[in-house]
């Protein structure tokens, strides 16, 4: 029989559970705005969240939000600026006018040979006062890069046998990569990553430039029939940033935990990305992708077209008040150091 006494006991039990739960809840919770799904490109953010939780015994929680749940990918920097979330990933070429200092890392043919060098160059650039001032306009503190290898193109249709075959081809290419492809007559477009498979499949674009992980994550190789194995024209720079006010509000302990988690997160990212190639080559074979190899003579001619792009960047950014030559010299000296 249900009595007042039993109801009271039941209520007490529920209340006990209700009051017990907060003891296990995080003292601080940060939201991270991401897009797509968990993939090699986001592994460092996944690891960062694990490290921060472990270092603070769960008192500092970083919640990862995928699929543009919090914001569209091209609006993540805006969301950071007014505190819609505490952390976000974005790509500089999504809005080059908002983060011009970072676009130096998207210039074609910089000569970055591996992901470890990409990390070193990025972190050196993040330490430059002009870069910090540039991002501070959006209340953003640069935390860590998302290092990516050189991009190559996956496409559908006639297989290009020379670089001149890109003349008139509509390609998904951003930033310096887009400028580089425009220099050989291609027509670059800024289709979002999530829309790229459909764009290739429908013929809206004939090819898309991505790093291997993105070709796999966004299924472009399922729509494509060829891939440029050695074009290597450049890459896109995609940092992880935090809201400056949220960072300043952290306790000393939580701030130290976050800062100390960056290097383990990057180490995990690099190890995971290198292992991705074990899946990449079989995926190309499984999808019947023709791997295009251009001659060294053609590639040399292609690289020569990077010079005017560098010069135009220097002129534009210097005119806008950035120490452009200083930033480019820092990047080059770090690469060659």
Image (cartoon, helix red, strand yellow):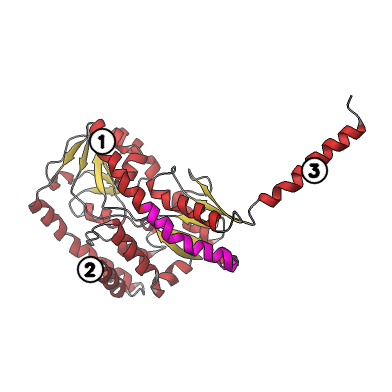
Mark count: 3
Question: Do tag 2 and tag 1 residues touch (Cβ < 8 Å)?
Answer: no
Q: Quadrant of the C terminus?
A: bottom left
In the image, 285 versus 204, the foreground residue is 285
| Marked residue nearer the N-terminal end (3 or 2) | 3
Q: Check disc 2: other Cα within 10 Å, few if <14, some if 14-19, many if 20+.
A: few
In the image, 204 versus 115, the foreground residue is 115
Question: Do tag 3 and tag 2 residues touch (Cβ < 8 Å)?
Answer: no
The mark lying in front, picked from 3 and 2, is: 3
Occupied quadrant, residue 328: bottom left
Is residue 337 a member of the stretch shown in magenta?
A: no
Q: Is residue 252 at all visible to an observer of this figure?
A: yes
Q: Is residue 44 above or below residue 317?
A: above
The residue wearing badge 3 is 15
The residue wearing badge 1 is 282
Q: Is residue 184 above or below residue 320?
A: above
The local secondary structure at tag 1 comes to helix
The residue wearing badge 2 is 336
Residue at 76% across / 48% down in the picture?
A: 19
Q: Check disc 1: other Cα within 10 Å, few if <14, some if 14-19, many if 20+.
A: few
The local secondary structure at tag 2 comes to helix
- Rounded to the nearest angstrom, the CA distance separating label 1 from label 3 is 55 Å
| Marked residue nearer the N-terminal end (1 or 3) | 3
In magenta, the rendered stretch is 248-269
């Amino acid at each position: 029989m249900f009595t007042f006494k039993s109801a009271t006991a039941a209520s007490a039990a529920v209340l006990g559970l209700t009051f017990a739960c907060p003891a296990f809840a995080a003292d601080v919770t940060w939201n991270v705005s991401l897009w797509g799904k968990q993939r090699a490109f986001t592994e460092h953010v996944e690891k960062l969240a694990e490290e921060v939780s472990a270092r603070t015994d769960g008192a500092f929680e970083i919640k990862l939000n995928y699929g543009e749940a919090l914001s569209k990918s091209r609006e993540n920097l805006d969301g950071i600026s007014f505190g819609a979330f505490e952390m976000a990933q974005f790509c500089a070429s999504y809005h080059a006018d908002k983060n011009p200092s970072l676009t130096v890392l998207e210039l074609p043919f910089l000569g970055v040979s591996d992901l470890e060098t990409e990390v070193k160059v990025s972190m050196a650039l993040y330490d430059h006062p002009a870069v910090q001032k540039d991002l501070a306009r959006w209340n953003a503190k640069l935390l860590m890069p998302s290092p990516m290898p050189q991009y190559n193109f996956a496409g559908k249709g006639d297989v290009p046998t020379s670089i001149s075959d890109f003349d008139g081809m509509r390609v998904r290419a951003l930033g310096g990569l887009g400028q580089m492809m425009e220099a050989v007559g291609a027509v670059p477009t800024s289709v979002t990553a999530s829309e790229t498979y459909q764009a290739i499949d429908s013929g809206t674009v004939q090819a898309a430039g991505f790093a291997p992980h993105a070709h796999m994550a966004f299924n472009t190789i399922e729509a494509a029939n060829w891939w440029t194995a050695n074009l290597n024209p450049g890459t896109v720079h995609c940092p992880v940033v935090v809201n400056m006010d949220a960072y300043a509000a952290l306790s000393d302990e939580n701030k130290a935990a976050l800062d100390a988690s960056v290097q383990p997160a990057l180490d995990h990212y690099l190890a995971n990305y290198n292992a991705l190639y074990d899946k990449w080559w079989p995926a190309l074979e499984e999808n019947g992708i023709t791997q295009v190899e251009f001659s060294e003579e053609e590639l040399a001619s292609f690289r020569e077209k990077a010079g005017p792009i560098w010069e135009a960047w220097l002129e534009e950014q210097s005119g806008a008040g950035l120490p452009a030559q200083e930033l480019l010299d820092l990047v080059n000296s770090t690469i060659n150091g």
